[in-house]
Amino acid sequence: MILFSFWEFLQFKYPEICAEFKYDPSFPIRGLYYDKKNGCLLKLDFFGSIEPDGCYYGRHKLSRTEIEKVYGTRHIGRDQARGLVGLMDFFCFSEACLIADIVQYFIDAKLDFDASYIYQDVNRAIQHVHRSGLVHRGILLDPHRYLVKNGQVLHFLRMLRDRGKKLFLLTNSPFYFVDGGMHFMLEDSIGYRDSWRELFDVVIAKANKPEFYTSEHPFRCYDTEKDNLAFTKVDAFLPNKVYYHGCLKSFLQITKWNGPEVIYFGDHLFSDLRGPSKAGWRTAAIIHELESEIHIQNNDSYRFEQAKFHIAQELLGKLHATSANNHRTVACQSLLEELNEERKKARRMMKKMFNNSFGATFLTDTGQESAFAYHIHQYADVYTSKPENFLLYPPEPWLHVPYDIKIMPHHVKVPSALFKNQ
């Protein structure tokens, strides 16, 4: 595991076995929370309650009884929420997996540990491999392994340029990494021979998001040939130039681009989208898992289990409403137990189709929206799996996500008739 083998293992003297941990892509999902007090990985629903099958201590899934023993109730109160850390970006998968593996190691070794220290060390390791350039250099040494050539992205950007739209690139990465990655993805082997920088009116690197949105740091012009920063004041963004640092306040003063006229694309709900949405920009969340989840939801086997779940739920509600506990016959009680078991089986089957440990990214096992979906409602005007999907729409219309806490636009509403046709 690169996080430990290069730095934390040396700095904090973690056991040597920690350097041998392997990433398990089948374990984590995006949108989990790590409890720095109790050391648990949590999946929360729209209202901040722990999903019954979504609480892990290390790699051990806690039962409902164990959850109530740790938290008192499934609902996370305001005081408890202060100790939670959201794992919302693309790097959260390896982060969640590594945290769980370290916690499990300490549990198995019967070692005392503070759960907050584990998060701090893992987070510092992630920050280090980014800031030191380990990740950037590793990717550029083998771009075919990590990056995908995508002519559709180029087509999307050129379409926007042709329609008179202004484009800007805002990233925390250093320019050499951005340049190498964009050159590989856009310029090589897809018939585009101009510099990728000509696609953008403004290019800003090392922006230090999310601080970019609240600070008053000045912009610095970056010399791509000499690899240094100019000392002259930046009061205009010049064509084909690269800028470092800066802040939203100066950006708006220089560009005169009003908030509602700007749509910002990003894949981190907090670092990328929370700041822009509060500043009045419109936002588009890029969520790569969306395609696979839509595919699963449209699969006949999933829709069949979904229909079974809702039918069992509806019948249970009717039976509970028509018969009091002390007047139920043996047959009625038996039917209730059978329906409840069928509902549980359908819920487990739906969960396993997404992720065996935590289920779907956007949904809880009972079909409610997850906390991750809640944050999308909060900070994203629209969401999609990749920017080039907007090629299907003209760039002039304003797109809005209907605010409905019961279902998101991409979720399938299953009619009961589907169950009868199986």
Image (tube, rainbow, N blue to C red):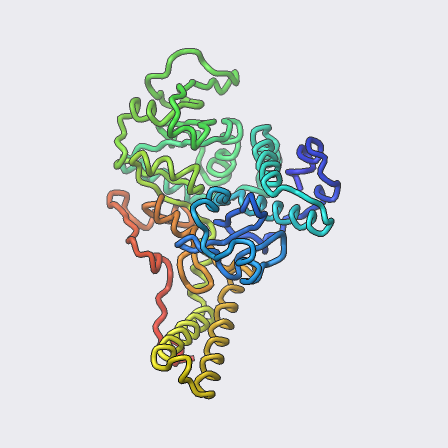
Expressed as whole percent of the image width and height from the top left, the position of residue 291 reads: 44, 55
Q: Nearer the viewer, residue 161 or 262?
A: 262
Q: Quadrant location of residue 20? A: top right
**Residue 341 higher or lower than 63, as above or below:** below
Q: Nearer the viewer, residue 122 or 261?
A: 122
Report whether 23 appears left or right of 236: right
Q: Residue at x 28, y 49 (%)?
A: 400
Q: Quadrant location of residue 212? A: top left
- Quadrant of the frame with the C terminus: bottom left
Q: Residue at x 32, y 38 (%)?
A: 263
> How many numbered marks have been drawn onto this rendered protein structure?
0
Q: Is residue 7 visible?
A: yes
Q: Residue at x 74, y 41 (%)?
A: 15
Expressed as whole percent of the image width and height from the top left, the position of residue 335 reads: 45, 83
Expressed as whole percent of the image width and height from the top left, the position of residue 190 reads: 47, 40
Q: Nearer the viewer, residue 304 or 196?
A: 304
- Quadrant of the frame with the N terminus: top right
Q: Is residue 140 visible?
A: no
Q: Residue at x 47, y 87 (%)?
A: 330
Report whether 113 appears left or right of 158: right
**Residue 207 higher or lower than 234, as above or below:** below
Q: Quadrant location of residue 63? A: bottom right
Which residue is most to the top?
231
Which residue is most to the front?
326
Expressed as whole percent of the image width and height from the top left, the position of residue 362 reads: 43, 55
